[in-house]
């Protein structure tokens, strides 16, 4: 089979290209549009954002002239303009997910309920959906994948996101027949469970990013979510609730993230984990029961054994998303998906003392953070999945800082897509 670069070139040589619809023109979306503009055989033909000027700016930064950009909410007008080699900007999500001119939809919003709506609409309209929204995936990914399978389209996470990068290493090692012990990622900032948009504001301004998004990295939520996605894809579990999170160099990983009886810190094998000190990389730790394989690995300078590390020192975030778009389009295959159903859960923990009647503000906010548990642990505690938290979730009873928030202490005051999908998933997927 031809590589993706050759398939895209072949498509371009035929005068065709993959037509991408994007929702979310923030940092991730902007980077993706600019990257795709440099590629053969692919184009983001329509972009939706709640602020249409964000979408316009994204195309301008990618080098498109103003006459090539049209704002529209009408499908006939938008389709006609796309056929004339233009691109469309809009504030209507359903135009992106329904318009016939789009082959693959990308969600780059990072908002769980919005992501659930985008994915559901795309699948109902028989379009492949690429999720740059791991928060949605860990909450309702299994039911969305089931729906996509039934519709004959691809539901997938993104290459370049850390779960996708881990998946590539895992697939390589698993195909080779290695005994994989641990998979994981680096964390590039010190864990601060109290991080919030105010404390992250100054650094966020320096980096040109959202303070809420940065807070979700600092308080560990993003890491918990990403490793939950990996757990649900390959069936591995956290060794302890919240994972260990040790500090280590790449060279130390094969002697640290291994079973205790071999000198490491793990009580189990087949574990998801994160490490301070190896960011922005991802890793797989493996061994073999074949003596000749050990000899070969040592000859190839992978270490003294008996455990070895495969390490990828980068992930290119949304710049790699086009690879998942192409894989879905050409091969009808996902980069990463929750093949194992619900194995782990990112649950909701109080970031501060919460009072009766207080509304929760979601991921990266002032009120809650995420923690990975096994599915069985989450069920036994009746823990609230973090992706279900939004401003409509209100405390019925006080909860102390550091406590897990359970279904019985909250009230959800408005029906949303993600709550409906989660209810369906809980009934149908075990």
Image: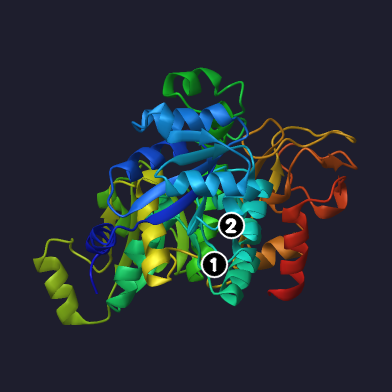
Q: Position of residue 202 (x, y in %)?
A: 51, 17
**Looking at this view, is 60 or 168 the one in front?**
60
Q: Which residue is located at x 51 percent, y 40 percent?
A: 88
Label 1 element class = loop
Residue at coordinates 56% horizontally, 58% vertically from top-left? 240
Q: Is residue 384 visible?
A: no
Compare residues 224 and 336 and report the one nearer the observer: 336
Relative to 46, residue 265 above or below: below
Quarter of the image with the C terminus in it = bottom right
Helix, strand or loop under label 2:
helix
Toward the viewer: 79 or 264?
79
Badge 1 density bin: few <14, some 14–19, many ≥20, Cα 10 Å? many
Give x and y (percent) for residue 203. Answer: 47, 21
Q: Earlier in the sequence, mark 2 or mark 1?
A: 2
Residue at (69% x, 48% y) in the render: 113
The numbered disc on residue 137 is 2
- The percent coordinates of residue 209 (x first, y second) are 48, 27
Q: Is residue 89 left or right of residue 166?
A: right
Quadrant of the frame with the N terminus? bottom left
Residue 358 coordinates in the image, percent (x, y): 84, 33
Would you name the residue on which mark 1 appears? 338
On screen, residue 345 versus residue 168, left or right, reads: right
Using residue 31 as the reference point, say whether residue 229 is left or right of it: right
Q: Are marks 2 and 1 in contact (CB under 8 Å)?
A: yes
């Amino acid at each position: 089979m031809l590589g993706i670069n050759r398939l895209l070139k072949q498509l371009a040589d035929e005068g065709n290209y993959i037509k991408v619809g994007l929702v979310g023109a923030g940092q991730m979306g902007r980077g993706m549009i600019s990257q795709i503009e440099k590629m053969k055989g692919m184009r983001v033909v329509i972009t939706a954002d709640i602020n249409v000027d964000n979408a316009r700016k994204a195309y301008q930064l990618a080098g498109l002239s103003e006459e090539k950009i049209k704002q529209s909410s009408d499908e006939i007008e938008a389709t006609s303009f796309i056929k004339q080699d233009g691109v469309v900007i809009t504030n209507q999500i359903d135009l992106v997910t329904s318009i016939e001119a789009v082959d693959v939809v990308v969600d780059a919003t990072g908002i769980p309920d919005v992501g659930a709506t985008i994915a559901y609409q795309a699948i109902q309209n028989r379009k492949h959906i690429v999720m740059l929204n791991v928060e949605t995936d860990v909450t309702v990914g299994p039911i969305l994948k089931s729906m996509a399978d039934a519709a004959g389209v691809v539901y997938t996470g993104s290459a370049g996101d850390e779960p996708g990068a881990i998946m590539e290493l895992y697939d390589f090692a698993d195909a080779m027949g290695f005994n994989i012990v641990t998979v994981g990622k680096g964390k590039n900032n010190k864990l601060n469970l109290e991080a919030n948009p105010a404390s992250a504001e100054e650094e966020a301004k320096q980096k040109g990013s959202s303070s809420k998004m940065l807070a979700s990295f600092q308080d560990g939520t993003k890491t918990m979510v990403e490793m939950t996605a990996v757990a649900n894809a390959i069936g591995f579990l956290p060794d302890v609730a919240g994972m260990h999170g040790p500090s280590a160099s790449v060279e130390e990983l094969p002697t640290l993230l291994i079973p205790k009886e071999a000198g490491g810190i793990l009580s189990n094998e087949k574990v998801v984990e994160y490490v301070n000190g190896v960011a922005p990389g991802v890793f797989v730790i493996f061994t073999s029961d074949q003596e000749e394989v050990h000899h070969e690995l040592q000859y190839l300078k992978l270490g003294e054994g008996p455990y070895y590390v495969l390490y990828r020192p980068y992930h290119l975030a949304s710049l790699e998303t086009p690879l998942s778009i192409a894989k879905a389009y050409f091969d009808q295959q996902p980069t990463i998906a929750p093949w194992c159903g619900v194995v782990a859960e990112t649950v909701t923990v109080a970031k501060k003392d919460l009072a009766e009647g207080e509304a929760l503000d979601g991921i990266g906010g002032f009120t809650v953070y995420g923690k990975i548990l096994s599915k069985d642990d989450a069920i036994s505690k009746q823990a609230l999945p973090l992706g279900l938290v939004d401003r409509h979730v209100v405390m019925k009873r006080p909860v102390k800082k550091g406590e897990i928030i359970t279904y019985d202490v909250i009230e959800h005051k408005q029906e949303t897509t993600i709550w409906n999908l989660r209810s369906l998933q809980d009934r149908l997927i075990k």
